[in-house]
Image (cartoon, rainbow, N blue to C red):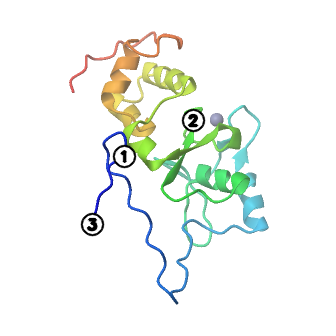
Amino acid sequence: MVIKINARGRAAAPAPRPPRAGATPRKKRGATLNAGDIERFWAKVDQSGDCWLWKCRRTASGGQFRVNGKRPVAHRIAWEVTHGAIPPRYAVRRTCGNLLCVRPEHLQLASGAECAWRAKLTPAQVAAIRQRYSTGTISQRGLAREFGVSPQSINRLLHNLTWRQVTPRRGRAPAAASV
Ligand SMILES: [Zn+2]
């Protein structure tokens, strides 16, 4: 197989194989929602604040919505009912940094490559990270995992070495980088 290398020197993802002649089209990933499902979905969302919060079952990756025997992540559903199907290899990011937020205005499509290699934070996420770290309930590693960035990125922003334009962090002093 020939691996294409793009301008950044990274291997480009192989193009999807065309379907075999006569093959039945593969079932689309994700759940197909009918009008009733969509109504049931929004009934589980608290829309009273700036962020629209998922009120039901949740996991480490966000809210979970049970439909057709599956449990897709709630914010992906919110994107799909608003904009249509999520393109293959794309993720949906919450620009506000709120794990339970499903407000379509706070959701942004990001390619898998962006998520894996150049996950970038938004000012709102930086403020959220500093605020949550100051409460002492989550570690730098936990924050890194949750926001999809390296522990070093978290450490640097907690030391105000990056993102100085966002309100500097006060309170709990972060441990020096050990990684
Ligand atoms: Zn939000």
**Image coords of residue 27 (percent x, y):** 55, 76
Q: Which mark is residue 109?
A: none
- Determine contact: label 2, label 3, CB under 8 Å: no
Depth order, front residue of 54/8: 8
What's the CA distance linking mark 2 and mark 3? 41 Å
Quick check: 69 above or below 98? below
What's the CA distance linking mark 1 and mark 3? 16 Å
Quick check: 46 above or below 21? above
Q: At x 43% / y 38%, what residue is drawn? A: 146
Residue underneath mark 3: 1
Quick check: 34 above or below 21? above
Label 3 is placed on what type of residue? Met
Q: At x 57% / y 35%, what residue is drawn? A: 98
Mark 1: few, some, or many residues within 10 Å (few <14, many ≥20)?
few
Q: Which comes sooner in the sequence, label 1 or label 3? A: 3
Label 1 is placed on what type of residue? Asn
Q: Which comes sooner in the sequence, label 2 or label 3? A: 3
Q: At x 51% / y 52%, what residue is drawn? A: 90
Mark 2: few, some, or many residues within 10 Å (few <14, many ≥20)?
some
* Quadrant that contains the N terminus: bottom left
In the image: residue 173, left or right of residue 48: left
Q: Comparing marks 2 and 3, which lies closer to the viewer?
A: 3
**Image coords of residue 45 (percent x, y):** 71, 47
Residue underneath mark 2: 98
Residue underneath mark 1: 6
